[in-house]
Amino acid sequence: MMLSALILALAVGWILRGSISNLANLELRRFDLMVAGFALQMLLSRASAIGWSLLLDWGFPLLLLSYGILLYVMWENRHLSGMTLVSVGVVFNLVVIALNGGMPVSPEALAVTGQEGVVPVLRSGEPIIHTLMTEDTLLPFLGDHIVTPRWFPHALRTVFSPGDLVMMMGLLWLVPRAMQRTIVREELSDGCEEAQEEEKAGA
């Protein structure tokens, strides 16, 4: 879902006459850790296919670790517009995942998107990142139960959580602004002014 949100944000930035090249001017900190956090989640989503015992035996702790890494990166980049919303969305997902041993997914929502075949897989408990939503699920309203609109292409129809939606809103605010040169310069200037004020206060 995050990748789809990023692509949508880039499209919005392009429509607003922004330039992808301006993203290079964005003061993004700890990009290496951000890549590591997302890479770990991708590995966990493919854990069964890969067959790595470490991923299978320590899947849930590693999943929580990946979210911890991402939250740290977002804290380091809290100066960027929209990053607060992204962080809130991540926290929403982390809470429901921590309480249920994975992201609960609504079987009804899966049926609407034509993914009924996923239900038996989730029921088996094999996936690490997701779990099947049941009556015992804690905070089910934070789970994956929101369905993409019917007018979406069938291949892109999916189920997502309120946390994903909040993260999407944050990215739709952050990325298009960053693609506009004047906005990027303005934020960098604000960051320099804050640093100068901190230096004066320390002196």
Image: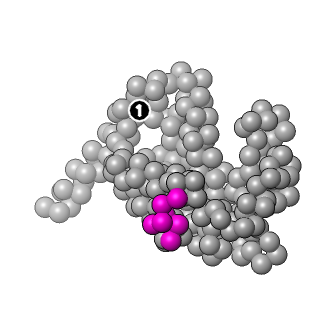
Find out whether residue 14 is within the magenta segment.
Answer: no
Tell me which segment is drawn in magenta.
51-57
99 sits to left or right of 136: left
Task: State which quarter of the image contains the C terminus.
Answer: bottom left
81 sits to left or right of 103: left
User: Is residue 172 among what the camera can see?
Assistant: no
The residue shown at (48%, 66%) is 53
- Three-letter code for the amino acid on which mark 1 is drawn: Leu
Image position of 99 with respect to 30: above or below: below
Image position of 76 with respect to 80: above or below: below
Residue 91, image x and y in percent? 56, 64
Image position of 193 with respect to 139: above or below: above
Q: How many marks?
A: 1
Main SS of the magenta segment?
A: helix
**Mark 1 residue crowding within 10 angstroms, few (<14) / some (14–19) / many (20+):** some
- Give the residue pinned by disc 1: 23
The residue shown at (50%, 24%) is 18
